[in-house]
Image (cartoon, rainbow, N blue to C red):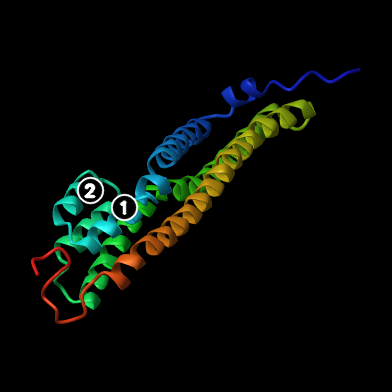
C-alpha cells in the first residue's frame, strides 16, 4: 500500500496563526534583500575610476575641473572626496580623521539597513517553535477529548501540522541568516575598497599640517 503524497500547501494552510507571522517575516526578508542587492554595491558606493581621474586634475591644480568632476558624483567616495577637496587647507591629520568619521558613519548606516535580516533570522524560528507548541497542545487536547489514543492518526496528524511551524520558521531563518552574513562580508569589502581609494589622496596630495594653501590655489 503506497503512502499518499504529502500536500505541503494543505499543511501550511492548517498550520495556524504562527505561519502567517512567519510568512510576513519572509516577505520582509525578501524586500530587505532586494533593496540591499540593488543599493549596496561596491560599484555604487566606491566607483573604481573616480580617483584615477581626479588625481591628475588635483596635481595640476585645475580647481574648475576638480569641482566639475566631483559635482556629478553621488557615491560615498565622491562625497568624501568632495569634503576633502573643499577643506584641503586643513591639516592632513585633522582632515584624515574627518574623512574617516564620514566613512564610518555612512558604513554603519548601510549596516543598519540590513539589520532586519538579523531580526528575521532570530525571530522566525522562535515563532515557529511557538506555533509547534500550540499545535501540540491542540493535538493532545483532541486526544483528551476523544478519551485516549484510540486512533493514533489523530495524534500523528496534529503533530505533523504542528511541526510545519518549526520547519517554516527554520526555512525562513536560514536564508535570512546567510544573507545577513553575506552583507556583513560585503560591508567589509566596501570598507577596504574605500580605504584603498582614499589613501592615495590623503597620503599624497594633502598639504602638511599647518599649511593653509591647498592644491589648486593661486601660486
Q: Classify mark 2: residues with Cα within 10 Å, few (<14), some (14-19) or many (20+).
A: some
Number of numbered discs overlaid on the protein picture: 2
Which residue sits at x=28%, y=55%?
54
> What number is the disc on residue 53?
1
**Horizontal and vertical percent position of residue 82:** 20, 56
Dot 1 and dot 2 residues touching (CB under 8 Å): yes
Q: Spot the residue most to the right.
A: 1
**Horizontal and vertical percent position of residue 20:** 48, 30
Front residue of 35 and 167: 35
**Horizontal and vertical percent position of residue 7:** 69, 20
Disc 1 element? helix
> What number is the disc on residue 160?
none
Query: Looking at the picture, does residue 106 appear above or below residue 208?
Result: above
Q: Quadrant of residue 39?
A: top left
Front residue of 57 and 147: 57
Q: Classify mark 1: residues with Cα within 10 Å, few (<14), some (14-19) or many (20+).
A: few
Amino acid at each position: 500500500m503506497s503512502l499518499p503524497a504529502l500536500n505541503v500547501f494543505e499543511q501550511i494552510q492548517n498550520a495556524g496563526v504562527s505561519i502567517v507571522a512567519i510568512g510576513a517575516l519572509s516577505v520582509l526578508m525578501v524586500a530587505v534583500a532586494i533593496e540591499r542587492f540593488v543599493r549596496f554595491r561596491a560599484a555604487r558606493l566606491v566607483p573604481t575610476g573616480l580617483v584615477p581621474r581626479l588625481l591628475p586634475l588635483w596635481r595640476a591644480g585645475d580647481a574648475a575641473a576638480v569641482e566639475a568632476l566631483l559635482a556629478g558624483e553621488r557615491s560615498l567616495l565622491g562625497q568624501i572626496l568632495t569634503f576633502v577637496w573643499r577643506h584641503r587647507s586643513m591639516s592632513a591629520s585633522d582632515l584624515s580623521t574627518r574623512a574617516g568619521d564620514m566613512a564610518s558613519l555612512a558604513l554603519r548606516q548601510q549596516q543598519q539597513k540590513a539589520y532586519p535580516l538579523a531580526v528575521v533570522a532570530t525571530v522566525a524560528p522562535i515563532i515557529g517553535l511557538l506555533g509547534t507548541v500550540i499545535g501540540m497542545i491542540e493535538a493532545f487536547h483532541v486526544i483528551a477529548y476523544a478519551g485516549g489514543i484510540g486512533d493514533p492518526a489523530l495524534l500523528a496528524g496534529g503533530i505533523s501540522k504542528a511541526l510545519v511551524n518549526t520547519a517554516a520558521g527554520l526555512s525562513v531563518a536560514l536564508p535570512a541568516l546567510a544573507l545577513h552574513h553575506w552583507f556583513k562580508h560585503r560591508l567589509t569589502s566596501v570598507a577596504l575598497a574605500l580605504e584603498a581609494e582614499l589613501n592615495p589622496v590623503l597620503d599624497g596630495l594633502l598639504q602638511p599640517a599647518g599649511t593653509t594653501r591647498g592644491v589648486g590655489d593661486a601660486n
